[in-house]
C-alpha cells in the first residue's frame, strides 16, 4: 500500500496483468530508480529544449544515432516523424500541417505493413500510398516487397516510406532503404514493440533508417507516456520544434541545442506536435529506464521469465482439461509466454470471467480466435504469479461446472 493510497481512495482496482505491456492496462511497471529520476526532475525548472537535447544526446549515443528525442509515445513519434519529413525547417509548412495540398505529402507503405497506427501517419497530413501485395497475409504466396514495386510508386509527391518492423518484415528493410535512398527519399521505421531483442535499438539505425521509433512504456520499462524518435539530426530538430511550446518572443527566444535557428525558415508557431507534450519527469524517467534496460543481462532476464512460467505451468497442468505450452509471445519476440488452451471452456467466456474477478486477471488475446490465451510475464509482478495461476484454475473450474 502506498503512502497516499490514492488508487483505493478513488476506488480503482489493481489488476493482475499477464497480458504484456499493453497501453490499455497502463504499460510497463517502473523500477524505483526510474521513479527517483522522475522525482528529481519534478523538483526543478528546466529549459525543455535543453533537456530534450541533452536527453536526446544520451539516447542517440546509446543507439548509435545522430540525434534523438523523447516523445509522448511511439504513436506520437510516428506523427512527429511524418511532420518532420513533410516540413523540414520550413515554418510555413509546419504552420499548415495537417493541411498538405500542393506540397509533396505521400508516404508509401507496403500493404502488409498497414495497421491501426496508420492514423498517426495520416494525422500529420501524410497521404498513405499502399503498395505491394498481401501474399504473406493471405497465405496465397511467398513474395516479400520488391524494389520495382517501390520504384513504380515513387513520384515527385512522395516524401518517403513508413516501414512497420516485425521479425517477418525486417528482412525487407535493407532493400527498402536502398531503394528509397537511391531516389533521395526518407525511411521511417515503426519499431515500437520490437524489443527485445535489445540489439534492435542500434540495428535499425545502423541499417540506415532515417528515423526509428520505439515505445518507452513497453519493454524499456519507462513511463507509459513516452517514446523514442531517433535518427537524422535535422529531422529530429524539425520534430522537436514542432512539439515545443512556441509562445516565444522572437527577440528573446534562445533555442537550445537541436533547434537550428539559422536553418529555420521563419519562427514557427505551435506545431502539430504541441498536443503531444512530454513532461520533464517523463523525459528523465525514460532516459533512466533506457540506461537500465541496456544494462540488464538479456539472457538472464529470459531465463527468469522461463523459470516463472514453468512454475505457473506446474500449477495450471493440475487441471487435466488445460494445456499450457511454453513459446515466444510473438515470433522472434524474445519474451516467452504460456499458450493456454482449455479443452472444454470457451476462451472468450474465460477471458470475460477473469476480468470480472475482484482482483481482475488479464491474459494476452492475440491468439484468442484460435482458442488460445497467452500468459505473458513481462508486466506481472513475480510475487503475483502464483495468485494469477490459481485464479485462472479456479475460474476455469467454475465456468466448466
Ligand atoms: C505499441 C505500438 C505503437 C504505439 O506505441 P505507444 O508508445 O503506445 O504510442 C505503435 N506501433 C506499434 C507497431 C506498436 O506495437
Image: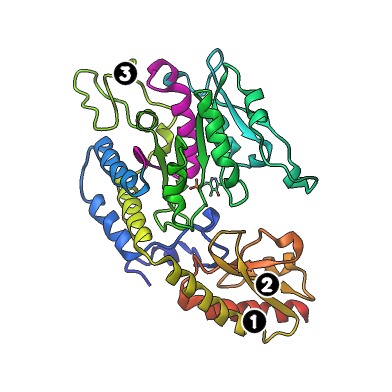
Residue 335 is situated, as x and y percent measured from the top left of the image, at 53, 64
Where is residue 26 drawn, in percent x and y? 49, 57
Taking 244 as reference, is 284 above or below it? Answer: below
Q: Is residue 88 magenta?
A: yes
Mark 3 Cα shell of 10 Å, populated few (<14), some (14-19), many (≥20): some
Which residue position holds label 1? 316
Q: CA distance from mark 3 to mark 2?
A: 56 Å
Question: Which of 67 and 184 lies nearest the eye of the viewer?
Answer: 184
Residue of label 3: 267
Q: Can residue 53 be seen in the rendering of this structure?
A: yes
Query: Magenta span covers which residues?
Result: 65-93
Is tag 3's residue or tag 2's residue first in the polypeptide sequence?
3
- Mark 1: C-beta under 8 Å from nearest atom of ligand 1: no
- Secondary structure at badge 1 equals helix
Query: Which numbered circle lies on residue 31?
Result: none
Which residue is most to the bottom? 318
Amino acid at each position: 500500500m502506498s503512502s497516499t493510497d490514492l488508487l483505493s481512495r478513488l476506488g480503482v482496482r489493481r489488476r493482475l496483468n499477464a497480458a504484456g505491456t499493453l497501453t490499455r492496462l497502463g504499460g510497463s511497471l517502473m523500477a524505483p530508480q526510474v521513479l527517483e529520476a522522475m522525482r528529481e526532475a519534478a523538483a526543478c525548472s528546466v529549459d525543455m529544449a535543453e533537456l530534450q537535447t541533452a536527453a536526446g544526446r544520451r539516447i542517440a549515443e546509446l543507439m548509435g544515432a545522430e540525434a534523438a528525442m523523447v516523445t509522448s509515445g511511439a504513436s506520437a513519434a510516428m506523427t512527429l516523424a511524418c511532420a518532420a519529413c513533410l516540413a523540414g525547417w520550413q515554418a510555413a509548412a509546419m504552420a499548415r500541417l495537417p493541411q498538405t495540398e500542393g506540397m509533396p505529402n505521400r508516404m508509401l507503405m507496403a500493404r502488409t505493413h498497414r495497421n491501426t497506427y496508420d492514423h498517426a501517419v495520416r494525422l500529420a497530413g501524410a497521404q498513405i500510398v499502399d503498395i505491394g501485395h498481401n501474399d504473406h497475409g493471405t497465405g496465397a504466396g511467398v513474395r516479400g516487397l520488391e524494389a520495382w514495386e517501390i520504384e513504380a510508386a515513387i513520384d515527385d509527391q512522395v516524401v518517403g516510406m513508413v516501414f512497420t518492423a516485425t521479425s517477418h518484415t525486417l528482412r525487407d528493410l535493407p532493400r527498402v532503404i536502398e531503394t528509397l535512398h537511391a531516389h533521395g527519399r526518407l525511411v521511417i521505421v515503426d519499431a515500437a514493440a520490437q524489443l527485445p531483442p535489445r540489439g534492435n535499438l542500434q540495428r535499425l539505425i545502423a541499417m540506415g533508417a532515417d528515423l526509428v521509433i520505439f515505445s518507452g512504456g513497453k519493454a524499456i520499462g519507462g513511463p507509459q507516456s513516452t517514446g523514442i524518435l531517433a535518427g537524422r539530426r535535422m529531422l529530429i530538430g524539425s520534430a522537436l520544434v514542432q512539439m515545443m511550446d512556441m509562445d516565444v518572443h522572437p527577440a528573446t527566444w534562445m533555442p537550445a541545442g537541436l533547434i537550428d535557428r539559422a536553418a529555420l525558415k521563419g519562427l514557427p508557431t505551435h506545431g502539430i506536435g504541441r498536443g503531444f507534450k512530454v513532461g520533464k519527469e517523463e523525459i528523465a524517467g525514460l532516459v533512466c529506464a533506457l540506461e537500465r534496460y541496456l544494462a540488464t543481462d538479456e539472457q538472464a532476464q529470459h531465463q527468469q521469465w522461463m523459470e516463472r512460467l514453468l512454475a505457473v505451468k506446474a500449477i495450471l497442468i493440475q487441471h487435466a482439461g488445460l494445456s499450457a505450452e511454453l513459446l515466444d509471445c510473438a515470433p522472434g519476440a524474445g519474451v516467452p509466454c504460456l499458450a493456454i488452451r482449455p479443452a472444454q471452456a470457451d476462451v472468450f467466456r474465460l477471458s470475460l470471467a477473469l476480468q470480472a474477478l475482484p482482483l481482475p486477471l488479464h491474459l494476452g488475446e492475440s491468439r484468442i480466435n484460435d482458442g488460445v490465451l497467452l500468459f505473458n510475464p513481462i508486466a506481472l509482478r513475480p510475487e503475483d504469479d502464483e495468485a494469477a495461476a490459481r485464479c485462472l484454475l479456479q475460474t476455469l473450474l467454475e465456468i466448466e461446472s
